[in-house]
Each structure stands twice: as C-alpha cells, then as structure tokens.
Amino acid sequence: MSGEVPRVVLVGAGIVGCALADELTERGFTDVTVLDQAQGLAAGGSSSHAPGLVFQTNPCRSMTAFARYTVEKYTALGCFDQIGGLEIATTEARLADLARRHGWATSWGVESRLIGPDEVARLHPLLDREQVLGGFLIPSDGLAKPVLAAEVQAQRAIARGARFVFGQKVVAVETAGDRVTGVRTEADTFPADIVVSCAGMWGPVLGEMVGLTVPLVPMAHQYAFTGNLPGVDAEALARQPILRHQEADLYFRAHGEALGIGAYGHRPMPIAARDITSSELPFTKEDFEASWESAVELIPALAEAGVDRGFNGLFSFTSDGMPLLGEHPRLHGFWVAEAVWITHSAGVARSMAEWIVDGQPELDLHSSDLNRFEQVQLAPDYVLERSCQNFVEVYDVLHPLQPMESPRPIRTSPFHSRQQELGAFFLEAYGWERPHWYEANASLPEVAEVPPRNEWASRYWSPICGAEALVTRKRVAMFDMTPLKRLEVGGPGALEFLQRMTTNNLNRKPGAVVYTLLLDERGGVRSDLTIARLDQNTFQVGANGNLDLDWLTRHAPDDVQVRDITAGTCCIGLWGPKARDLVEGVPTTLDTRKGYFTAQRAFIKNVPVTALRLSYVGELGWELYTTADLGLKLWDTLWEAGQEHGVIAAGRGAFASLRLEKGYRSWGTDLTDEHDPFEAGLGFAVRTDKDFLGKDALAGRTSDKKLTCLTIDDPWQVVMGSEPVFHQGEPVGYVTSAAYGYTTGLNIAYAWLPTGVDEVEIEYFGERVTARVAQEPLFDPEMKRLRG
C-alpha cells in the first residue's frame, strides 16, 4: 500500500457507515466502498427507525465529546433540529442527580442549566406541573434526522470518490496471513486493505467470520405513537425540547400533533444477531402497560389521545454500556465501529477516521476500545446478562462505585476464603472480586477517628476504610493486589523492545525495578508501568489492563514474547512501618535491607516469591508475588507471623486514600493519552537521553494546564470525580480522583486545571465547595517512609 490510497470497504450503510465514509474521504482515503445487505441507505438497521433524540450529557468525557461533534456536524449539514433537551425530576433523589448531571455537562463543556418547576411547565405546558420538582435544560440538544443525515454524508463521500453498493450480503472476509484482503458477498468480491464493520446489530455475525468476539446484544426497545393530542398546535409542539422522564424510564418527542414515547421500563428483550430478519419487531402491548400509565400520569392529555401504534425497535447494548471501537487484535486491517447510537454517530466516525488514517484518534478512547475486555468478559452468558442489566439500568441513578450484582463472583484471588472469613465487603472490577474493607476491622479504635461524610460519598464506603488506612501507616497491613495486570516480557530482544516502547531507562542490572510510561506517537501517556528486570532477558510488567497487553503484543518483534501471567499468579501488598519486622519474623531468604525499587526472588518460609520493594501507598514494604496454587499458603504465613505486629487486612477504600496522600496517579482516571508526561506530573519518568516511541512529539512541547492537587476545606464534602472546577466564577477544569486523606486530615481532590490558579471552587450536586491548590505529595514528601 506504500504511496497508494488504501482500498477501504465499510460493511453497513447505516448512519455510522455513512458518517465514516464521509470522514475518511474528507481525509483523502477516497477509495471507499460501502456495502449493505439492504436495498438503500439506512434502510434495514437501527438508523431506519431511530427517533433521533440527542442528549449530550454523559458521565464519560469521550461520549459527551462524540455527542457534541454529532450536534455540531448535523446542525451544519441541516440534519438536526436544535430544540433543546429537558430532563425532569419528580423525586428529591432525581433532582439531586440532575444537579450531578449538570456538573458533568459543565465539566465537559456543554452549556446547560438547572431550572425550576415553573420554567419546566412553561417549556412543556402539557406536563402536570404539580408532579415536577425541577429540570435540567441543555439548549444545544435536539433531534437528529438519521436517514437524512445518512443520505447527506453519503452524497458528500460519493462526491469525493466513494461508492455505495446495495443488496450485498457479506458471507466471508478474505485474508492472507495476518492481514485482511477483501470482502466476499453472495454476489461479488471486493478487494480491500481495510475493512470496517459498521453492521450494527449484525456486528457479531461479521466478527465470527474473522474469529473475533464482538460483545454486543441486539435488544428490543419499545416506541409508541399516540393519537393526536386534543387542542395542540403542531408547530408549537415541535418547538418544545425533547423530554426525558428517567424515573419512569420514558422519553418523549413530537410527531405532528402526536407524541412519540420511548420506553425502557419493560423486561429486556434480547435477540441473537443471527436470528434478526428485521430491525423492527411487533409491538408487545402488555410490555407497554406500566410505561403508558406513567406517561399518562405525567401528561394527562395522553389519556384522551391514546396509543395509535408502536413497534419494538432493535438496537445494540454492550456489557458496560460503551461502544466497540478499534482494530482486530490479530488480523491487521479489520476494524470495528459497533454499538454506536445516533447520538454519538458523527463523533465516533471522526475518531475512527483519525485512527485509521493518522494512526490514532485525538480523543482518548480507552473506555470504548474493542480490546478493553478480559477474556472472561467475552463469555456469551456474561455478555448477555450484563447487556440486559445495562438495558434495565439505562436511566437509573448509578453510583460510580456501584457494581453489577450478577454474574458474580467470577474471578477470585487465592485469598478469597480468608477474606470472606474476615467479613470483606467486595466490589468488582474486570471480573475480579476486590475487598473494599473488612468488617473484622470494625472494632479498631481508629474507626472513631474517621470523620463522617455526605450521603452520596458514604455509599459503598465505611469508616472502616479510614481505620484500615491509619493502621497501615501505624503498623502493617496486607492488601490483595492480585487483580493488578501482570505481563511477562521475555526473549533475546526483550530489553531493546521495552527500551524502545517506554520512556525510562530499563538497561539496569537484573534486580532493578523501574517506573516508566508508554507513550503514543504524539507523546500522550497510553499507560504507566512498573517493570522489574528479573534476569537478563525476562521482565515482569505491572500494567493497567488488557489494552497494555494489546499494545505491547502489536509492537513486539519475533524475538520477544509477551505473556499475560495474571491468572496464574497472585500478589499481596505488605506495607507499613512494621512490614520488615513481620518478614524477618518468618524463616526467609529475602534480603529485607535491599533498597527501594529492587526485585528479588526468595522464599518466605515454604513459599517462593518474587518480591518487589515498592509501594503504591507510600509505606515501607513489598509487593509479594507467587503462583496461584501457593497464594493461600503465602497469606496464612504472613497472617500468622503478623499477629504480634498487629497486622490487618486492608481494602481498596484505604488504598485509594493512601495513594492520593502520596500523589500517585491512576491511569485512565487521572490521565490518559490526551495528556503528556510533564503536564501530568510524571516528567521524572522520562529519559531524554534515549530513543523511545513518542519522544519526538515531546520536544519543545509546552502546556497551560496540569494535573493539580487540591484540598477541600469541608471534610464532609468528599467528592467522587468528574465534578467541574471553577476559578473566579468560570469553569476551568474537572476533578479526576478524590478521597479523604485519613493520615493528613485533608480532603483531597486531583483536577486538571490551568497553571497559575490558587483558590478554586468545585461544583458538587449544584453547590460550590471551596478548594485550594496544594503542594504535592501531601504525605512524606522526602520519601523517608518508603525508603525505610
């Protein structure tokens, strides 16, 4: 393909395929063929029946950015009615959540405001004013016209050289070695260097053709049309903002003198992708009864209008509610852009085009990346159950720590039985059960030292978390670090490979541990890693997740092997000022006097361990790794030896507080590939005297923003992340991580802010909370505790 425009085949001529054809051809990829099994644009999939509501506000920054671009583009193309969006509250809990949503919109740059019930009634006079407590108004929201948007974008692409071929059911994706070469339909073959699946609900079928699990579930969603409303002016009705009544799982939009009602309040109705013959299924009236009662209660005039007709429209859900974007991990040139709603269609298409043409998107897409899932999360039953639950919860008020309750447990560490005996309260991440605190610690006297916090921050939290943090600082604690992603990189070229891929110098003697960064071509931080050189050609990599495995695997040369060793191993973080005393009380070959950031293989009594002398909580101690079969033995050995030193088991609640007191970053939360190392406060991990991926992009780079440590005056107001930050009355940034620092007695938040600000305010549930810029780290700035 060198020097030539690549041949691109897009499978699916819905709004996503049309938008992507437009974005690709605009960037010079003009040899684009769009195939569809239907006989016309947006004729057979979700785009053909989607009501087109675009509500931009989302807890995820990238999803809001997708929606913002969709609004901007479709407005410019004449395919969008910017009539505004209105979400209402009829309970105090929902009213509080609207204030939280207003905070998200402000953080992500979407103009919005909270309004009272009188203004809600003025905007929507048909509502029962007495039920409404308030509303959340987003003036730039509105109605997309999906079929028209598809047509306009397709015509733009065609004018640049693209072609659309209909009546083409794909039966195979052709390959040669590890590259895609074309697409075969029932009628023809289309050569391709790049194939993108934009097949929507049929995406899993296309994925099967190339050995790829596309973890989405087509789901039926009810949409009903009322009869004409009595005495209503159609023109006035069309100017009213689109309406969401999320407490009843309902949304409304105008259709002439009638209303369209979308309902999520019914049972999940999944269907296998292979069984779909139409994107519209017959309306099931019995499933709509409860939704209709709620609709009439809110808008009494509906009782007279009645339900004229309806359908159950199919569209895609995923196990975490996010799109599926990216390239096949093993087949170069096969890309996926699936589980994308109309709301995000143009934004997704832009990012996909940047990714395909330029090698990476401008936006951070880690939460939408196709390759984000662990293998266990791709099990068909898991995908089905979680996707159905996402349908049920689509309009629910969800706490940021709230886990799904089923299917659980799936992944447990070897210590799980001991944790249960200690009364562990488990939350879940990436399929792992992770203790957040232990009820066995409820009697610790330190519990009385923990200040109370607001109701929202008290959910999925206990003052025991604070006691566990204080005991870690005073004595010693055992943390289960098994869910930490662990990779082994080995082979003759391992050192050279890792030197090229990361920012710090790994050319150290075996036994050295190095904190380093993975950058992309533009110098953004893809991940932060802790790498231990175990011997000449073997490195253990502490990573952030499956995307690190995917990134390193894609770049590894033939003489390097990258293996995920997480499942076969386990880890205890043994930390605290008495950690050394504890280990020295056990028969061990571990040299407890070896310095910070060193690694050694040793025995702790009868258990072989790989011991890394480092700590994510800022205390003396080790990460102690062993094989999964010996994990329970390691736990019991340390637990027994630790009794005389007052050892406790401690959970993630304590961990989060301790790491923020030390200013340690969490990739994916505090920083992403949209940030460079220096503005993220990680410049110390960059060695400019060596070559590495992304180095050239850092040269001469400056920034007017930085990740900033804040302390909040009021200990009651523990924030949770994503809240907007104001300086002199104007929004200037947003919170990333936050926790109360039990040792320091400081309420801590980290935020992306302009350089040079000092006193700021954080908007929390509609109120302003004073915060101040602080020097970091807040705890042990001289590193005396760590170095021990």
Image (tube, helix red, strand yellow):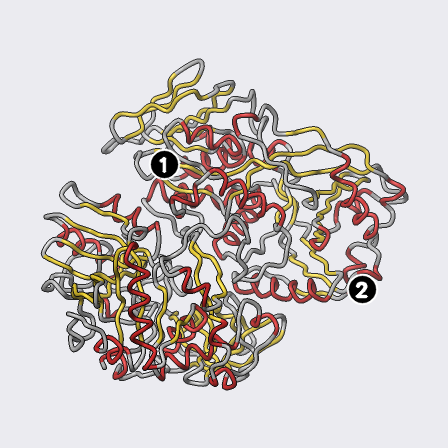
- Mark 1, Cα crowd under 10 Å, few <14 / some 14-19 / many 20+, is few
Task: Tell me what residue is drawn at x 50 percent, y 86 percent.
Answer: 449
Task: Tell me what residue is drawn at x 23 percent, y 33 percent.
Answer: 2
* Residue 518 visible from this viewpoint: yes
Mark toward the start of the polypeptide (1 vs 2): 1
Residue 773, given in percent of the width and then of the height, sits at 43, 81
User: Is residue 521 placed above or below 278 in the rendered structure?
Assistant: below
Pointers 1 and 2 in contact (CB under 8 A)? no
Which residue position holds label 1? 28
Q: Amino acid at mark 2?
A: Asp
Which residue position holds label 2? 118
Residue 364, given in percent of the width and then of the height, sits at 40, 54
Number of disc labels? 2
Residue extending furthest toward the top? 187
Residue nearest the viewer, comparing 86 with 244? 244
User: Is residue 666 placed above or below 24 in the rendered structure?
Assistant: below
Residue 763, given in percent of the width and then of the height, sits at 57, 72
Label 1 sits on a secondary structure element that is loop
Q: Amino acid at mark 1?
A: Gly
Is label 1 or label 2 in front? 2
* Residue 522 visible from this viewpoint: no
Q: Quadrant of the C terminus?
A: bottom left
| Residue 250 in the figure: left or right of residue 293 | left
Residue nearest the viewer, comparing 413 with 710? 413
- Mark 2, Cα crowd under 10 Å, few <14 / some 14-19 / many 20+, is some
Q: Quadrant of the N terminus?
A: top left
User: Is residue 429 placed above or below 200 in the rendered structure?
Assistant: below
